[in-house]
Image (spheres, coloured by chain):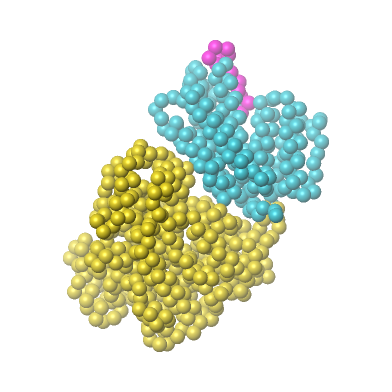
Chain colours: A yellow, B cyan
Amino acid sequence: MLDKSNDIQSKFWEIFSKQDRKKVEEFKTYMDKFAINFNLYQDGNFIEQSLPFDIIPRIISKQEFSKMEKGLIQRIIALNLFLEDLYTDAKIVKAGIVPEEFVLEAKGYLKEFAGFSPSKKIRTHINGIDLVKDTKNDEWVILEDNLRVPSGASYPLSIRDTYRKIYPDFFEQLKIEPIKQYPSYIADSMNYVNCGGINVVLTPGRFNSAYYEHSYLAEKIGAQLVRANELCVIDKKLYFKNYNGKKIRVGSVYRRLDDDFLDPTFFNPESLIGVPGIIDAYLSGNVAIMNAIGNGVADDKGIYYFVPKMIKYYLNEEPILQNAPTYLPYFKEDMEYIFNNIHKLVIKDVAEAGGYGVSFGHSMSKVQLEDMKTIIKANPRRFIAQELIEFYDEKCYLNNELKQRKADFRAYVVMGEDVKVWQCGLTRYALEAGNYLVNSSQGGGFKDTWVME
Amino acid sequence: MEELLTANSATSLYWLGRYLERVEATLMEVSIAYDNIIDVDANAGVNLYKNFDIDLKYSGALNFLNEALLGEHNSNLKNIVVQTRENAIISRTQLGEDSFGEIIELHKLFKNVSYATSSIDYKFIDIALSLISEIWGSLEKRQQRKQSNYFIILGKLVEEVDFHLRLNKDKQSALIIMDEIDTIVEILANGAETKEYKDIDKFEILDSVNKKIDLIIID
């Protein structure tokens, strides 16, 4: 990433070279105070793991980010229109742009919600779009859309706060976009769709993998952090149970749990983390739930293939940001291409996330490749294949040495009265050299992202 | 405007106040006993821990510190600090970054010392007590007499009464603290009945405190 055309990179390294390296320890100690943990269950045991982080930020020029920003806004507007259309008139299906079976077979499509339109017709309130920068053409490429419950925004907020305290020089001498406004974007969105009452953040609880983030964001947003048993539904209205027995109406819920667990009377009856009756309140228009229920259909990797077509269909525009070249075995000619090139493609299970269900053709044996073909043939809708994108490494300061690691980027886009792209994001890097999987659940770390002039 | 607070958060704040006070009060009593063990009364530690229904065994002052603070018994301070941290994590949104960060630091201090090969010495107690003072200071700084802060103070005061009575200190002081508790209870639970405690015994005092807590938090 460090090249002569990139002055802002050299400005960073110039200041970095003058910094006292002993401060790295101070940085780590300060970060420890935030208790940034990623909780896991392993063999039935609850394990709190500190999330690894790196102090070298990813630097993106303001100019480059502005282009990305336009593309992200375009994409989210199109995806919101798609979801609203899909659950109401389904014109895009009727027009043959997205095959009906693709929708009906998508794990996240909830036919029970057909005909329902949420508050202000907004479905994609808080979105995490994963991108990488392709080394071939030096362009950002979209890898996937996360329109359900994208996590991770609290990590850059925490690391930035630490950075400013330990290394103020960078912020005094460089023009780095401030990022503190992100929680206010969420608060604005919650207020905009609010159906009358207070805002709450619904968490599965202390032992959820991202509990740190839930509590951090709730505080910054100024919303109450609640577990399901701290809410109740009376006459199709949602209430917050105060410690003294008073009940206060809730108008907007930023839920941090998946659809399946949201309401045991509607979805999974065994869910202990859901609020009985909340769907009734939602369908009655008495509470906004963000993100909207049923968004999982747009996260489906098969549906991802159609996003550029959605942009053309709904906005009559060319996509500003491109998808990674993707093939659907559902289409005969794509299936043929996949089978002929499987050794160099990445195969993804459409319903998986977090780096799970991803197979790299180049690291599979002949037998494994043949097995994969058989599986794909038996269930073509379940998979997509993508060209392996060679994306840039980022410099990481690991064990007192600068090392190169693969890194992706999650951009956060918030929709309320208007659509805002956070001038930061989550840069995730792989812990091992050459590894392409950067997800936290795969052992990846995170770093700050500076948008700089 | 009344601050909103879930029963879970209120309970966690209350217990955060109790556990933190317990750690601080124990450290203070341990440091007094430690000083006595050196050359005044070798059994000072045994007598102290009898108050907690613990039969503590040790060989000398330094070993007393280890056994008292990290021994396998109900008053193991590392375990109490773990509980303090748990309650801080649950009620984090009410705490503010400084106090939360300092509680995490306190936990780390105890965690590190429990893994260390060398014994605990007096310096450790000094560091831990300073850190706890910082935590109270940060909590105080944040206090605007909001409900969340009252729960922490309530927990602290209740623990003070409890500790006071366990150590058989004068009842009068405990009754003074009870008056403070009543003031907070009146704020948190409008219309709660307060009571005169002049002639009641220590068990009645503790029983009355617990009933008051039930009055405040409705789950």
The spot of residue A15 in percent (x, y) is 34, 46
Q: In the rendered image of this protein, does residue A419 appear above or below residue A172?
A: below
- Part of the protein shown in magenta: B37-52
The spot of residue A282 in percent (x, y) is 59, 71
Nearer to us in this view, A326 or A24: A24
Q: In the rendered image of this protein, does residue B199 appear above or below residue A19?
A: above
Q: Residue at x 24, y 72 (%)?
A: A373
Q: In the rendered image of this protein, does residue B79 appear above or below residue A158?
A: above
Quarter of the picture holding the N terminus of chain A? bottom left
Q: Main secondary structure of the magenta part?
A: helix
Q: Is residue A431 visible?
A: no
Give yes or no for residue B51 being in the magenta stretch: yes
Nearer to us in this view, A80 or A450: A450
Give yes or no for residue A278 being in the magenta stretch: no
Q: Residue furthest top?
A: B39
Q: Residue at x 26, y 59 (%)?
A: A5
Q: Residue at x 69, y 60 (%)?
A: A247
The spot of residue A245 in percent (x, y) is 70, 56
